[in-house]
Image (cartoon, grey):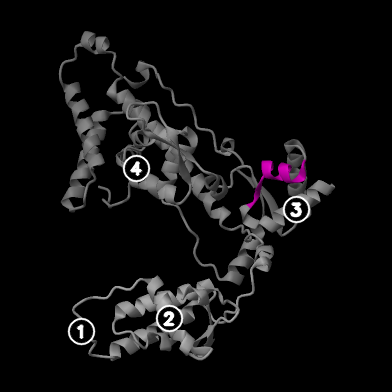
């Protein structure tokens, strides 16, 4: 591994699950983001290739070291973890809509889901999975929502591009199809 | 007939998709009349079971019935075209399709969410921050203080009857700190926490005193150690700044 990769490994160890952004790393190491990205790649490949108990991930631009998935059964045994948290179906629906359509207003989400989402949005905000992103120019200037860095982390996404593609919904489907 | 359950559906669109699947209706050639009938039946059985039906379900039902009734009336094609409004059926199908897509994705998201919980990070290394913290002469933890507070409360409640006073004397924490400073000057260098409460006639003053003691510990004027169930306070000798106050 190159020097910079090794330094990044050390820094990532210190910050733990909080992780470091590419910008933070490039500022600390006084090198370009390109070089950092290359080094982070090298580190990820190193951990994968050498069958290590640690992996280097990049969730939403935040690089961090985490235990490898196959450690889980042992960790579960060691820490006597019984339960896993689940998100409710309604929460997942709301999050999915925001992730694909952000920034989006509450009314637009409710139109898609067909149910009120006021309380759900507040819950998701409290969970730090979504945040307010300014206001729409529409009448009443409603609040716009978008997903957060935490969202990227809990769903293990490097970018929203990684989400499965939605089939384009024909906005102006031909009349014959339905009549 | 299917089983009617509460909370099974995330909303009216979810229910409609369920009915379309259950009754094998063609989503792309949707028979609105049939869907309306099934939907209405479902809502009715929910009501018969005294299940609360959220207003969103009723609002969608109203929309379906409106559409169905319009279909029964002779259609004036020219009026329809002139209005250039989206066919409600088309718009309903589009909403159902769009909703279905997001519903389909939730499974994948849930999987990702569960898998993420199986990989662990560690906390930020804070050793370097701990190292620069001054060595505090504190033995025992905050729970010891809480336990001690309970002991004092029991003692106060046993001192019945309390002195009855007409005029309530409201002391601030700062005033109490001043009083305590004078008081503990007469005490030996180390004394039991309870000594501070000796002159407290009511619960109010006990609380103020406790807060005052905590504040003095914070200011470094007092130190405390725990010996079994007993908390001892120690006058801090290194700090003589407060002596000049009076």
Q: Which residue is more in the foreground, A113 or B209? A: B209
- Where is residue A100? Give x, y as percent: 49, 35
- Which residue in the structure is indicated by mark 2? B180
**Chain on which label 3 sits:** A
- Which residue in the structure is indicated by mark 4? A117
Which one is closest to the eye, mark 4 or mark 3?
A: 3
Say if labels 2 and 1 share a chain: yes
Name the quadrant of the C terminus of chain A.
Answer: top left
Up-down: is B128 above or below A109? below
Residue furthest to the right: A2
Q: CA distance from mark 4 to mark 3?
A: 42 Å
Residue at point 60%, 75% (across, down):
B136
Say if labels 1 and 4 share a chain: no
**Residue stretch in magenta:** A19-30
Q: Are marks 2 and 3 in contact (CB under 8 Å)?
A: no
Secondary structure at badge 2 equals helix
Magenta run includes residue A27: yes
Disc on res. B148: none
N-terminal-most mark, 4 or 3: 3
- Most prominent secondary structure in the magenta stretch? helix
Q: Mark 3 packing: few (<14 Cα in 10 Å), some, or many (20+)?
A: some
- Where is residue A89? Give x, y as percent: 41, 48
Which one is closest to the eye, mark 2 or mark 3?
A: 2
- Which residue in the structure is indicated by mark 1? B164
N-terminal-most mark, 2 or 1: 1
Residue at point 34%, 28% (across, down):
B93
Secondary structure at badge 1 equals loop
- Which residue in the structure is indicated by mark 3? A9
- Where is residue A111? Give x, y as percent: 34, 33
């Amino acid at each position: 591994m190159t020097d910079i990769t090794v330094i990044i490994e050390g820094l990532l160890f210190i910050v733990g699950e909080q992780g470091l952004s590419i910008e933070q790393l490039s500022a600390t190491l006084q090198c370009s983001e390109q070089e950092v990205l290359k080094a982070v790649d090298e580190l990820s490949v190193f951990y994968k290739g050498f069958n290590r108990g640690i992996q280097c991930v990049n969730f939403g631009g935040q690089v961090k070291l985490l235990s490898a998935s196959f450690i889980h059964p042992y960790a579960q045994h060691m820490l006597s973890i019984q339960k896993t948290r689940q998100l409710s179906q309604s929460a997942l629906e709301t999050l999915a809509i925001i992730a694909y359509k952000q920034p989006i207003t509450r009314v637009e989400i409710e139109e898609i889901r067909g149910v009120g989402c006021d309380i759900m949005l507040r819950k998701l905000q409290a969970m730090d999975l979504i945040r307010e992103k300014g206001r729409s120019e529409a009448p009443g200037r409603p609040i716009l929502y978008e997903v957060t860095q935490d969202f990227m982390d809990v769903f293990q996404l490097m970018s929203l591009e990684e989400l499965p593609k939605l089939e384009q919904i024909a906005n102006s489907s031909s009349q014959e199809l339905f009549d | 007939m299917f089983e009617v359950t509460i909370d099974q559906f995330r909303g009216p669109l979810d229910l409609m998709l369920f009915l379309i699947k259950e009754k094998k209706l063609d989503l792309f050639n949707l028979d609105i009349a049939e869907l309306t009938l099934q939907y209405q039946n479902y809502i009715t059985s929910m009501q018969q079971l005294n299940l609360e039906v959220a207003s969103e379900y009723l609002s969608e039902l109203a929309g379906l019935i409106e559409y169905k009734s319009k279909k029964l009336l002779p259609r004036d094609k020219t009026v329809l075209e002139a209005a250039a409004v989206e066919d409600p059926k088309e718009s309903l199908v589009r909403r159902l399709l769009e909703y279905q897509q997001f519903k389909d994705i939730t499974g994948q998201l849930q999987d990702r969410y569960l898998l993420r919980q199986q990989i662990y990070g560690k906390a930020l290394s804070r050793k370097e921050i701990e190292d620069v913290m001054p060595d505090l002469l504190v033995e025992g933890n905050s729970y010891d203080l809480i336990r001690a507070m309970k002991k004092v409360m029991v003692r106060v409640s046993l001192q019945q009857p309390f002195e009855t006073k007409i005029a309530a004397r409201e002391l601030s924490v700062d005033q109490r700190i001043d009083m305590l400073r004078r008081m503990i000057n007469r005490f030996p260098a180390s004394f039991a926490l309870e000594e501070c409460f000796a002159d407290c006639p009511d619960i109010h003053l006990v609380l103020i005193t406790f807060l005052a003691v905590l504040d003095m510990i914070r200011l470094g004027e007092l130190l405390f150690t725990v010996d079994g169930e007993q908390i001892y306070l120690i006058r801090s000798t290194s700090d003589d700044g407060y002596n000049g106050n009076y």
